[in-house]
Image (tube, rainbow, N blue to C red):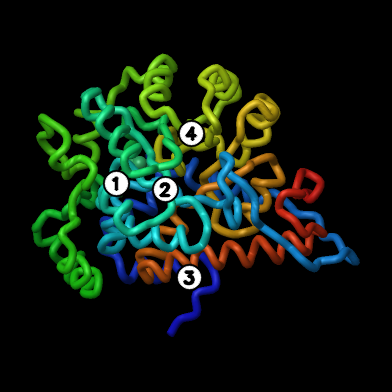
Amino acid sequence: MDKMLTIADLKRKAERRVPRMFFDYADSGAWTESTYRANEDDFAKIKLRQRVLVDMTDRSLATEMIGEKVSMPVALSPTGLTGMQHADGEMLAAKAAEEFGVPFTLSTMSICSIEDVASVTSKPFWFQLYVMKDRDFVNNLIDRAKAAGCSALVLTLDLQILGQRHKDLRNGLSAPPKFTPKHIWQMATRPKWCLDMARTKRRSFGNIVGHAKNVSDLSSLPSWTAEQFDPRLSWKDVEWIKERWGGKLILKGILDEEDARASLDTGADAIIVSNHGGRQLDGAHSSIAMLPKIVDAVGDRVEVHMDGGIRSGQDVLKAVALGAKGTYIGRPFLYGLGADGKQGVTTALEIIRKEMDVSMALCGKRLIRDVDRSILA
Ligand code: GLV
């Protein structure tokens, strides 16, 4: 059996196990993918300071995100179509995250529903909201997340219209897949995926099917987004959403200092510095490049989190050093899920934990809570 030592190992295995269109969906950025690449490349440019002869015993990565205890400052990102990387993917990933002691965030565009995930977990998870034109449906989603005991609402701000991902259009991405010769071939070459998928009934958008009215073509993400997502979403909307929700609120998709300052008026508990994994505005700066500027702009008036480009524990350490109180991984856990189901998600988290722990020690720190810009060279 291959030994999975890095996130790249999991990615290679996922590519062999997951039908091309779904692997590509996770592994794609908008247009030229320059921002997708910058997210990773800019992490590599940041250097750590090697320190010696300091006590390395009793290390801890434990900390808090929005007041919740986490075993390390890494949450699972809300990712669309996760249940297409592996049958029942969201339920498996949520269980892996719960056992590991990190937050799981369920996407609005998930395959397993809010209720499905609640049925297999015992601790609260987080729910990510896209705002649709149909406000009854949005209110209903918020209420369902509340009823399921979700402990935070993650409101995505940067995908009211969809950035074009060429691979998805070329692959004819849909959920469930269409039965054209090309798609049948993509699935037939992944027999284990097919077998697992045949055993579940969850093959479409679980939060939406049976809940939203007037949905004509749900299977294609671009047409569904164009038809349903509300392009008029504004700062004013954050107010009623916050009020309806009544709990912890996280704003996702802040990449500009001015927007970060504006977010302070909303009373949100945290903001996520994010460019949606390079899947939206191609040509935007990487998240890690913008993180310190945004941290400086808001100070400690709101908790700052970040996502985009994290492929190792060293990357998490660098983000924490630059002021992130928490980080999120999307593709790394999807690769784990595609490679090995729930165990693969756990493996992805273990890889990141080990890299972070050892690197933190070699930077001369024992507690992640004490990590700051002084560990950067
Ligand atoms: C949805 O969140 C996507 O980026 O595809």
Assign a secondary structure to mark 3.
helix
Position above or below: 266 against 251? above
> Disc 2 marks which amino acid?
Phe
Position above or below: 205 against 355? above
Calculate the distance from the C-alpha at mark 4 to the C-alpha at mark 3: 36 Å
Q: Is residue 67 visible?
A: yes
Residue designated by label 4: 248
Which quarter of the image is occupied by the N terminus? bottom left
Query: Mark 3, residues whose alpha carbon is within 10 Å: few (<14), some, or many (≥20)?
Result: some
Position above or below: 141 against 310? above
Q: Nearer the viewer, mark 3 or mark 1?
A: 1
Q: Which is nearer the N-term, disc 4 or disc 2?
A: 2
Q: Position of residue 323 (x, y in %)?
A: 68, 40
Q: Which is nearer the N-term, disc 2 or disc 3?
A: 3
> Disc 1 marks which amino acid?
Ile
Q: Residue at x 16, y 55 (%)?
A: 177
Residue designated by label 2: 125
Residue extending furthest top? Answer: 236
Q: Which is nearer the N-term, disc 3 or disc 1?
A: 3
Calculate the distance from the C-alpha at mark 2 to the C-alpha at mark 3: 28 Å
Calculate the distance from the C-alpha at mark 1 to the C-alpha at mark 4: 17 Å
Residue designated by label 3: 9
- Verify CB contact (< 8 Å) between mark 4 and mark 3: no
> Disc 4 marks which amino acid?
Lys
Q: Nearer the viewer, mark 4 or mark 3?
A: 4
> Disc 3 marks which amino acid?
Asp
Ligand 1 near label 1 (Cβ, under 8 Å)?
no
Calculate the distance from the C-alpha at mark 1 to the C-alpha at mark 2: 9 Å
- Verify CB contact (< 8 Å) between mark 1 and mark 4: no
Residue designated by label 1: 114
